[in-house]
Image (cartoon, grey):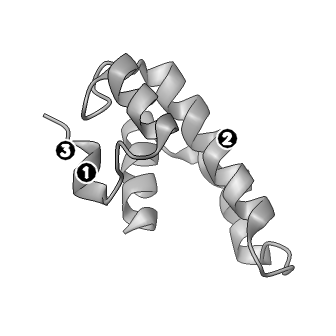
Amino acid sequence: MAHPVGYYSLSHDNALIKDMCETWGEGLEKMSESDTLWLIAKIAHEAWLECESSTAPSNEAESVLKRLHELKQWEKFALISAMVQ
């Protein structure tokens, strides 16, 4: 079972978080894989745009992007988990 959103210091005091939990469950466990991946991509992109650093992605990061096809789907999920820790 997924951790409830409160485990990640998210609160129902935020209307968006409350609405998401009402829609997909306290651990967002009812969210489809498609919605999950789409939202992860959009949230990450928006966070990147809001980042204080104006530094372009490194050559190493660009190289990883070009090689993502080498990963199996489960490896992509694991890599996302590893990167957010």
Residues at circles 1 and 3 in contact by the CB criterion of under 8 Å: no
Badge 3 crowding class, 10 Å Cα cut-off, few under 14, some 14 to 19, many 20 or more, is few
**Residue located 49% across and 37% down the image:** 15
Instruction: Confirm whether residue 69 shows in the render.
Output: no
Badge 2 crowding class, 10 Å Cα cut-off, few under 14, some 14 to 19, many 20 or more, is few
Quarter of the N terminus within the rendering:
top left
Of residues 47 and 66, the one drawn nearer to the viewer in this rendering: 47
Q: Is 75 on the left or on the right of 56, as rendered?
A: left
Name the mark on residue 6. Answer: 1
Task: Return the disc, 1 or 2, that comes first in the chain's sequence.
Answer: 1
Name the mark on residue 42. Answer: 2
Q: Residue furthest front?
A: 13
**Residue located 67% across and 41% down the image:** 42
- Name the residue type under label 1: Gly
Q: Tell me the element at label 3.
A: loop
Q: Residue 69 in the image: state x and y as whole percent.
A: 62, 42
**Residue located 35% across and 42% down the image:** 12
Q: How many marks?
A: 3
In the image, residue 29 sits, relative to residue 17, either above or below, namely above
Q: CA distance from mark 1 to mark 2?
A: 22 Å
In the image, residue 75 sits, relative to residue 16, either above or below, namely below
Q: Residue 73 in the image: state x and y as whole percent.
A: 44, 35
What residue is shown with label 3? Answer: 3
Quadrant assignment, res 22: top left
Quarter of the C terminus within the rendering:
bottom left
In the image, residue 83 sits, relative to residue 67, either above or below, namely below
